[in-house]
Each structure stands twice: as structure tokens, then as C-alpha cells.
């Protein structure tokens, strides 16, 4: 029991100080009811937030933060659902749950906003990992192209880029 508490404190301390050198600082959250007593759907979304945080911690270049103010990427968990597969072989009972699990998200960064979903088979962790992979791809599509940055920087310093085989100006 004491070991579990110490591990939780160490993990929480690691998330306290956001890494300012990382360009992507993400805040994962879900909407909560005003009553303070979560229903089953809200409990599922809160579990999905935990699963998403676990999956995103393993991604390089993304730092998880504990407040909206420190984040430049907001990830809202909208819902999660489970689709059951039919019964086991020959009408029997299946031992391992193999239905699809889906976590639906809304991403917002600056003026960009998108809805994504993570799909997994059997466990919520697989759906969260798939969603984290899709978030990384979403981020990569919105980064400025490095070749254009190089061309702009080079032109600022007075040098010109030439294409091999092109005539001299």
C-alpha cells in the first residue's frame, strides 16, 4: 500500500513541471457534471482520460501538463464505446473479450480543431495507444515544412538556393 502511494507521488511530481523546451504541451481532459457525483458514462470518460495520459506519456516530443494555461494542445475525451463481437466459436462462450473499443477525442491547437478516434481490439489501452499515434500524426501534419523554413532562413542571410542542373541566374 505504501509503495503504491509513493509511486503515485513520484509520477505526479514528474508531471508538475512542464518541459518548456518541448514544443507540444498537451492537456487531456473531459467535461464533468456539476453534481459532483459522476454517472457511468462520465466514469468511463475519466478512465479514458487516464488511459490517454498513459499512452501519451510514452510519445517523444509531447509533454503532459496539468493545466489548460500551460498547454498549447487541448485534448478533450468526448466519449468511449465498446462494440461486442458475437459469441465464441460454434455458438459457445468466448473466454477473451475481443470486441472493438473506441475512444473519441477533440483536438484543439490555436485555430486548428479536429475530431479523432482511437480504435483497439479488446482493451481500452489499445484504443488509447491508437489515438495517441493518430495525435502524433495530426501534430506532424500541422508542423511547418522544414525545407521552407530553410529557404526562408537562407534568403534572410542573402544566400540563394539553387536546384542542381538549373541555369545560373
Image (cartoon, helix red, strand yellow):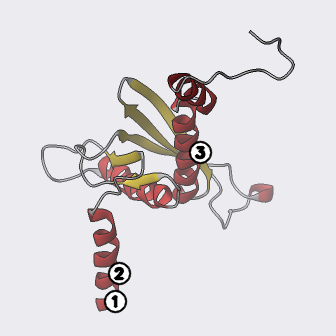
Name the one closer to the observer, 65 or 158: 158
| 116, 68: nearer the viewer | 68
Residue occupying the point 74% across, 21% down? 162
Q: Residue at x 68, y 49 (%)?
A: 86
Q: In this orientation, which residue lies closer to the viewer: 112 or 88?
A: 112
Q: Earlier in the sequence, mark 2 or mark 3?
A: 2
Would residue 83 be seen by someone viewing this image from the given angle?
Answer: no
Residue 118 at what x, y percent from top left?
Answer: 55, 43
In the picture of the structure, the residue carrying the numbered disc 2 is 7
Image coordinates for residue 9, horizontal then vertical, percent: 28, 77
The answer to which of marks 1 and 3 sits earlier in the sequence is 1
- Disc 1 versus disc 3: nearer the observer: 1
Cα separation between marks 1 and 3: 33 Å
Residue farthest toward the bottom in the current orientation of the protein: 2
Q: Secondary structure at mark 1?
A: helix
| Distance CA(mark 2)–CA(mark 3) | 29 Å
Name the residue located 12 percent from the left edge and 47 percent from the top edge: 35
Residue 167: image x %, image y %? Answer: 83, 11
Tags 2 and 3 touching, CB below 8 Å: no
Query: Which mark is nearer the camera, 2 or 3?
Result: 2
**Tag shown at residue 119:** 3
The residue pinned by badge 1 equals 3
Amino acid at each position: 500500500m505504501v509503495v503504491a502511494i509513493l509511486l503515485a507521488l513520484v509520477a505526479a511530481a514528474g508531471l508538475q513541471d512542464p518541459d518548456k523546451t518541448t514544443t507540444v504541451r498537451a492537456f487531456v481532459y473531459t467535461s464533468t457534471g456539476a453534481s459532483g457525483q459522476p454517472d457511468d458514462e462520465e466514469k468511463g470518460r475519466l478512465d479514458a482520460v487516464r488511459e490517454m495520459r498513459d499512452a501519451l506519456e510514452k510519445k517523444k516530443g509531447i509533454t503532459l501538463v496539468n493545466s489548460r494555461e500551460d498547454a498549447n494542445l487541448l485534448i478533450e475525451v468526448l466519449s468511449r464505446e465498446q462494440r461486442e463481437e458475437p459469441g465464441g466459436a460454434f455458438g459457445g462462450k468466448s473466454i477473451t473479450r475481443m470486441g472493438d473499443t473506441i475512444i473519441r477525442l477533440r483536438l484543439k491547437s490555436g485555430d486548428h480543431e479536429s475530431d479523432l478516434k482511437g480504435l483497439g481490439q479488446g482493451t481500452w489501452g489499445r484504443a488509447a495507444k491508437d489515438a495517441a499515434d493518430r495525435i502524433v500524426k495530426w501534430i506532424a501534419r500541422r508542423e511547418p515544412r522544414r525545407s521552407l523554413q530553410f529557404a526562408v532562413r537562407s534568403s534572410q542571410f542573402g544566400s540563394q538556393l539553387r536546384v542542381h542542373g538549373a541555369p545560373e541566374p
